Amino acid sequence: MGSESGLQAMIPSKKEIGFMVMDGFGLFLSITGMAGITLIVGPLNLVIKDLDYTLVFDNTALAFLICLGFSVAGGALAFVAKSGLRAMERQKEL
């Protein structure tokens, strides 16, 4: 669309906003999964002994795998979003 000036030059497009939201959600899933892993099998499990963080039928392995899945899915979402944002930046430079 040519060179934009003023406020229009600073406002990101809808596609860029979507990638930023996807990046934030990916980061949220990653941190949620890692926090869950530390609560289930990590050092926080030894500190907080009164609370039980197993999800289904007191199965620690299943809860660990679900939290690991959150971490992996969040990392993948963040990677895809950052790759999309970089590609859009390269497109703007040309």
Image (cartoon, helix red, strand yellow):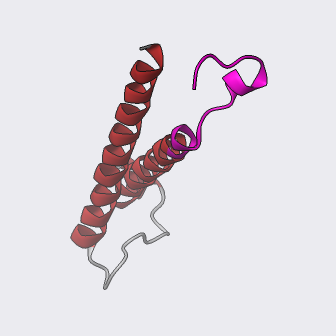
Name the residue furthest front: 2
Give the magenta part as a residue range: 1-18
Q: Is residue 54 visible?
A: yes
| 87 sits to left or right of 48 | left
Rendered image quadrant of residue 69: bottom left
Name the residue furthest bottom: 57
Name the foreground residue: 20 vs 48.
20
Q: Which quadrant of the figure contains the N terminus?
A: top right
Name the foreground residue: 40 vs 15.
15
The percent position of residue 8, horizontal first and vertical second, equals 72, 27
Q: Is residue 41 visible?
A: no
The percent position of residue 83, horizontal first and vertical second, equals 35, 32
Q: What residue lies at 38% left-to-right and 54% top-to-bottom?
A: 33
Q: Is residue 69 magenta?
A: no
Q: What residue lies at 41% left-to-right and 14% top-to-bottom?
A: 94
Rendered image quadrant of residue 2: top right
Q: What residue lies at 52% left-to-right and 46% top-to-bottom?
A: 18
The percent position of residue 4, horizontal first and vertical second, equals 67, 19
| 11 sits to left or right of 15 | right
The percent position of residue 25, horizontal first and vertical second, equals 49, 50
**How many numbered callouts?**
0
Is 59 situated above or below 80? below
Is 28 situated above or below 3? below
